């Protein structure tokens, strides 16, 4: 139950996935989700190898990782803000026109066409999760509490990490399906601009929090 609560908490990963579903496709969003899980697996592996303990014991090194992650998030916030700031006319939607039933709005089609490829989305997911050094430290501090009695931490923690990441992937896939079902009602130029504005705010806030160590 504790793992599910942690996994389902909103954060940059969920914001990125939502934006990719609205602006791209399920395949693109799935590639990003796989990138996030890959980053989580790498962080868990490095944590088990002792890097998490090293970061926790070295404030300077941890701060450098935090600032690098904050810059990545801030960069995405700026990109989202630029999309939000585009004039409405640049999205190609003619004023006063009503799209035909079942048609994708012109603004949404333009954004979708310019969206990232699956490879780019995978890298985005990899950076989104991998740029936060707190992920590995959290896993190494959180998971050992739940190692079954009679199992060594060396065997129990990797098993729990695999279960945790599997639950994370299931949650992301479930969220993607939900957003995809609602996408036909959300893919209007106005809604996409609002989503970009919220994305800029969320990434900006998390960038500041990460930089300040919050």
Image (tube, helix red, strand yellow):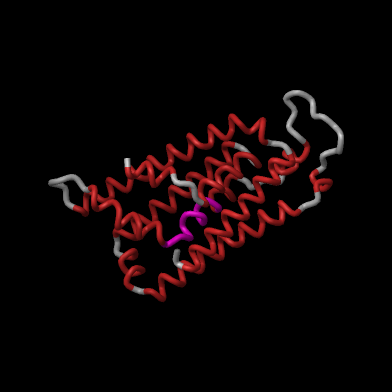
Image quadrant assignment for residue 154: bottom left
Which quadrant holds the C terminus? bottom left
Image quadrant assignment for residue 207: bottom right
Q: What is the x, y in percent for residue 69?
A: 50, 63
Please identify the dominant SS of the magenta region. Answer: helix
Instruction: Tell which of 29 and 135 is nearer to you.
Output: 135
Left or right: 181 with respect to 211? Answer: right
Left or right: 204 with respect to 39? Answer: right
Q: What is the x, y in percent for residue 119?
A: 57, 48
Looking at the rendering, the stretch of residues picked out in magenta corresponds to 124-133
Which quadrant holds the N terminus? top left
Q: Is residue 156 above or below residue 78?
A: above
Residue 126 belongs to magenta span: yes
Identity of the residue furthest to the bottom in this view: 60
Identity of the residue furthest to the top in this view: 101
Q: What is the x, y in percent for residue 97?
A: 85, 32
Instruction: Tell which of 63 and 160 is nearer to you.
Output: 63
Residue 87 belongs to magenta span: no
Name the residue: 48% across, 36% down: 173
Name the residue: 58% across, 59% down: 204
Name the residue: 32% across, 48% down: 161
Q: Is residue 178 above or below residue 3?
A: above
Q: How many marks?
A: 0
Name the residue: 63% across, 39% down: 22
Q: Is residue 164 above or below residue 204?
A: above
Left or right: 58 with respect to 174? Answer: left
């Amino acid at each position: 139950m504790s793992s599910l609560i942690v996994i389902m908490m909103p954060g940059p990963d969920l914001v990125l996935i939502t934006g990719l579903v609205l602006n791209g496709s399920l395949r693109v969003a799935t590639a990003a989700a796989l990138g996030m899980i890959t980053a989580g697996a790498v962080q868990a592996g490095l944590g088990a190898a002792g890097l998490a303990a090293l970061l926790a014991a070295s404030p300077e090194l941890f701060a450098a990782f935090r600032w690098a992650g904050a810059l990545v998030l801030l960069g995405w916030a700026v990109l989202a803000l630029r999309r939000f700031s585009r004039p409405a006319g640049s999205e190609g939607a003619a004023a006063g026109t009503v799209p035909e039933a079942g048609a994708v709005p012109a603004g949404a089609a333009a954004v979708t066409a310019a969206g990232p490829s699956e490879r780019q989305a995978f890298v985005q997911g990899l950076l989104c999760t991998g740029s936060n050094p707190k992920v590995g430290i959290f896993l190494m501090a959180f998971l050992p509490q739940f190692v079954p009695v009679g199992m060594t931490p060396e065997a129990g923690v990797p098993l729990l990490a695999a279960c945790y990441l599997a639950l994370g992937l299931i949650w992301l896939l479930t969220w993607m399906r939900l957003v995809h079902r609602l996408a036909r009602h959300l893919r209007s130029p106005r809604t996409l601009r609002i989503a970009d504005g919220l994305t800029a705010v969320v990434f900006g806030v998390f960038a500041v929090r990460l930089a300040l160590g919050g």
